[in-house]
Image (cartoon, rainbow, N blue to C red):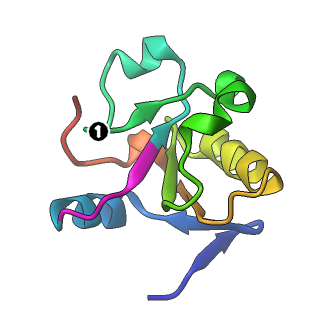
Amino acid sequence: MFQRQQLGISTITPEEVRSRLAKGEDLLIIDVREPMEVAMGKIPGALNIPLSELPERLEAIDRDKEAVLVCRSGNRSHVACQFLQANGYSNVKNMVGGLILWEGDLE
């Protein structure tokens, strides 16, 4: 599988995330939307760290795990990926299209 790039950020499609979760892969999914948005539904097991809180909550993100960043459309999660990379996180991916394109379950 080839790595897609989005201005230096690795990306993953919602379909790939859903497929990998269905296979039981242990993905660290970080939803960077605001709590009121997350209250309407999030990917099961996703950790909610709003983009505005990311600098104070870096310790909540395991540097050794692949982290998939998610938002509504893929824009805030792209910014979050850039921030994490700038802070030494090398295994981050932006879910392109965000939850707008998500066809899996929500919790």
Residue at left offset 33%, top offset 47%: 102
Q: Quadrant of the C terminus?
A: top left
Residue 14: where, in percent of width, then height?
37, 57
Looking at this view, is 17 or 92 the one in front? 92
* Residue at x 71% of width, y 25% of height: 56
- Tell me if 51 is positioned left or right of 64 in this view: right
Secondary structure at badge 1 equals loop
Kindly identify which residue carries mark 1: 45
| Amino acid marked by disc 1 | Gly
* x 65%, y 43%: residue: 75
- When asked about the image quadrant of residue 18, the answer is bottom left
Of the pair 66 and 73, the residue shown nearer to us:
66
Q: Range of the magenta residues?
A: 24-29
- In the picture, measured across the screen, residue 30 lies left or right of residue 92, that is left
Any magenta on residue 5? no
Q: Give left or right: position of 4 versus 66.
A: right
**Left or right: 85, with 48 as reference point:** right
- Packing grade of label 1 (10 A; few <14, some 14-19, many >=20) is some
Q: Nearer the viewer, residue 61 or 97?
A: 61
Question: Can you give x and y, in whole percent of width and height, for residue 59 in the image?
Answer: 62, 37
Judge whether residue 27 is colored magenta.
Answer: yes
Residue found at the far bottom of this picture: 1
Main secondary structure type of the part rendered in magenta: loop
Q: Residue at left 56%, top 43%? A: 61
How far across and how far down the image is residue 5, in percent?
66, 73
